[in-house]
Amino acid sequence: MIKTEKFPAYEEFDPLVPVWCVTPRRPGCIHRFFDTSPISPSGRYLAVFQLPFEDRQPEPGEKGNVCIVDLKTGEDWVAAETCGWEPQMGANINWGASDRQLFFNDVDTTSWKPFAWRLDPIAGKRRRLEGTVYHASPDGRLLISANMSTMRKTQPGYGVVIPEENVRQNIGLAEDDGFFVTDTKTGRSRLLVSIKDMVMRSRPPVNIDDPESWEVYGFHSKFNPQGDWLMLSLRWFKAQDNPVWNAFATKDVNVRFAWVTIPIEGNAMHCAVGPEQWEKGGHHATWFPDGEKISMNLKIDRGQMRFVEVKRNGAGLAKMHAGLTGSGHPTVHRDGRYLLSDTYVKEAVAFGDGTVPLRWIDLLTGREQTIIRINTKTSGELQDRTLRVDPHPAWDRTWRWVTFNAFTGGTRRVFIADMKNLTGGR
């Protein structure tokens, strides 16, 4: 896949695996998230987002770049410009079923309506879709997304920016807002499940006392690797006299959380992890490779953060290993034995100097290795946490290559690590 002579090797702190910077000439680049590989289905191309500036959040209508890196030739180019981005997830770039199917968000600045593009980055042809994208199904047939413009109500960085006066306010359980699915062939979008249905129909239930006194919004949404189930994130906070933006950073506003799972075809709905668990402290859930379980960080004993797992119906919540400290964005390898995660700069397992480890953990024995140590601290995050750089280590479809973000040479860069020697080709 990657022609290593085209990209500079990263050798600081003696990494245990080969690592290359794959955006050496293009500053301000990030890949999307730890649940989405930016490497194309064939392994030939890398899709990244280039921020136009790195020291502030965007204003409505400001554009960034969707960029493609040819991992064989080392060439890169701007495939599209877009107004539909924020600093943590960029434009939510997702590959579909082939190298000629790439999805990302944009905003119509005449109506301030967010929407997604279906782009062939090789031919340069594109088609506008009705809905937006947070996550694409593995076969590229469907896109799932919450309302991208309301994400900033609880936490900026993950959706799109439009003028505040154009953003709806959900007080109580909305029947016309929730999670939307878009057919990438027809371009049509529809409401898959409303916020009200998620709260009223989930078993186990989503426990919200006096729901009419809360603002309730959708946030993360993820297909499982098999493409037949979804995990959907709800967030809510007490309605205030004055409008709340960035509830995470607003004094005296406490945000509640729930993960709800639902089959893409059918009526079953489960609250897999409800507010009674989230209030202990936790973050960053995603699917196991088997599509049956969910992994996340959780202070399950109200003490130290732990890596935990739970079945998609909410049963079997347990630590993955009793002695391991949770951190960052954990994913379980497809062999079920190993876990890969990063860490935040201020978490206990970080090094305290702005550098963080990529952690390789044997869940059977509890043995842990730092496979890569790299800087992620930015000057901007001291004033605004939205401007931080998270590595977001993400496996490609072959389970050999891991892509991650860092902050080196005064800018955001994207790196790829070859994990073959650690995984044994599994």
Image: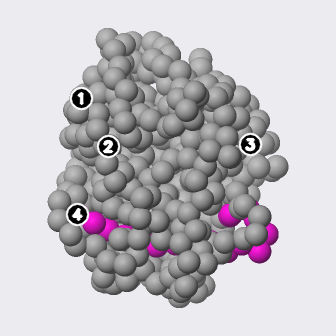
Return the mark for residue 166. Answer: none
Q: CA distance from mark 1 to mark 2?
A: 22 Å
256 inside magenta stretch: yes
What separation in Å lies between label 4 and label 3 (alpha carbons)?
40 Å
Horizontal arrangement in the rendering, residue 410 relative to residue 9 (left or right): right
The CA distance from mark 4 to mark 2 is 18 Å
Q: Position of residue 366 (x, y in %)?
A: 42, 72
Q: Residues within 10 Å of mark 3 (few under 14, many from 20)?
A: many
In the image, what residue type sits under mark 1? Answer: Ser
Q: Which dot, 3 or 2, sits closer to the camera?
A: 2
Secondary structure beneath disc 2? Answer: strand
Write the residue at 28% across / 66% down.
262
- Per the image, the residue denoted by label 2 is 189
Look at the picture and state if 304 lies above or below 99: below
Q: Amino acid at mark 2?
A: Ser
Circle 3: element type: loop
For residue 165, side relative to residue 226 (left or right): right
In the picture of the structure, the residue carrying the numbered disc 4 is 263
The residue drawn where x is 61% and y is 25% is 63
Residue indicated by mark 3: 378
Task: Measuring from the top left, give residue 19's x and y in whole percent.
Answer: 48, 35
Residue 293 falls inside the magenta stretch: no
> Comparing marks 1 and 4, which lies closer to the viewer?
4
Magenta stretch, residue numbers:
247-263
Distance of label 3 from label 2 (alpha carbons): 38 Å
Label ID, residue 98: 1
